Image: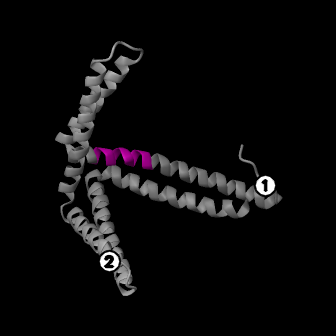
Amino acid sequence: MKIAVSSSWWSSIFNGILAILYGILALSMSETTLILIVKYFGVALVLIGIIITLVAYNRYRKNIPYIWLIFESILFVAIGLVVFFFTRATINLVLITIGLCVSMHSIGELFILANLPKFSGKMLFLVFAVLFLMSGIFMIIYSFRFATTMVFISGIFALVFGVMNIWFAFILRKLQKQSDKTDEVVEIK
C-alpha cells in the first residue's frame, strides 16, 4: 500500500498540473491550441513514418519482406507533412467529412422515424435526430470554429480534471502519512 500510494500521489499532482496548464491554454487561446495539437499530430505521423522506415531497413538487411512497410512509411510521412504544413485545411477537411457523415446519418434516422408508427419516446428520438443534423450542418459550415469551440470546452473539462487530480493527490498523500504512522492498510472511506 505504501509504495503504490507514494508513487500515485506524485503522478496525480503531475497530471493535475498538466491538465490545468492545458485548460488555461485551451481557454485563453483555443485557436492556437487547436493548431498546435494538430501540428503535433503531424510531427508524430512523420516520426512514426521514419520509425517504420528503420524497421523496413532492418527487415531488408535480414532478407525479410519489407515492401509494404516502405509504402506505409511513405504514406505516414506524406500525411504527416500535409497535416503539419496545411493544418487549417486538414482540420476543415476532417470536420467537413465528419459533418457530412453526421448529417447523412441524421437524415436517414429522421426518414426512418417518420415512417415508423407512434411509440413511446418517438418525439425524443426526433428531437435528437434534428439536433444531430444541426450539429452536422454546423460542422460543415463552421468547421474550424466548431473545432476551436471543442478545444475551449475541453479546456473547461481539463481545468476541472486538473483540480480534482490535485485534490485526489492530497488525499493519497494524507493516506500515505496515516499508513506510515500505523504500518497498517488504510481504507478509503
Question: Type of residue at label 2?
Answer: Thr
Q: Pointer 2: what residue?
A: 53
Q: Amino acid at mark 1?
A: Val
Quadrant in which the C terminus is drawn: top right
Main secondary-structure element of the magenta-colored stretch: helix
The verdict on residue 156 being magenta is yes
User: What residue is shown at x 33% (from left), y 49% (from top)?
Assistant: 151
Point out residue 94 in the picture as x, y percentages from the top left corner: 24, 50
Pointer 1 or 2: first along the chain? 2
> Which image quarter: residue 135?
top left
**Position of the N terminus by quadrant:** bottom right
Residue 161 lies, in percent from the top left, at: 49, 48
**Residue at 23% from the left image edge and 62% from the top image edge:** 83
- Residue that mark 1 sits on: 185
Q: Which residues are magenta?
A: 148-158
Residue 96 on the magenta span: no
Between marks 1 and 2 in the image, the one whose residue lies nearer the viewer:
2
Q: Nearer the viewer, residue 69 or 37?
A: 69
Residue 178 location in percent, x, y?
76, 55
Task: Name the image colouring.
Answer: one colour
Residue at mark 1 to residue at mark 2: CA–CA distance: 50 Å
- Left or right of 99 in this view: 66: right
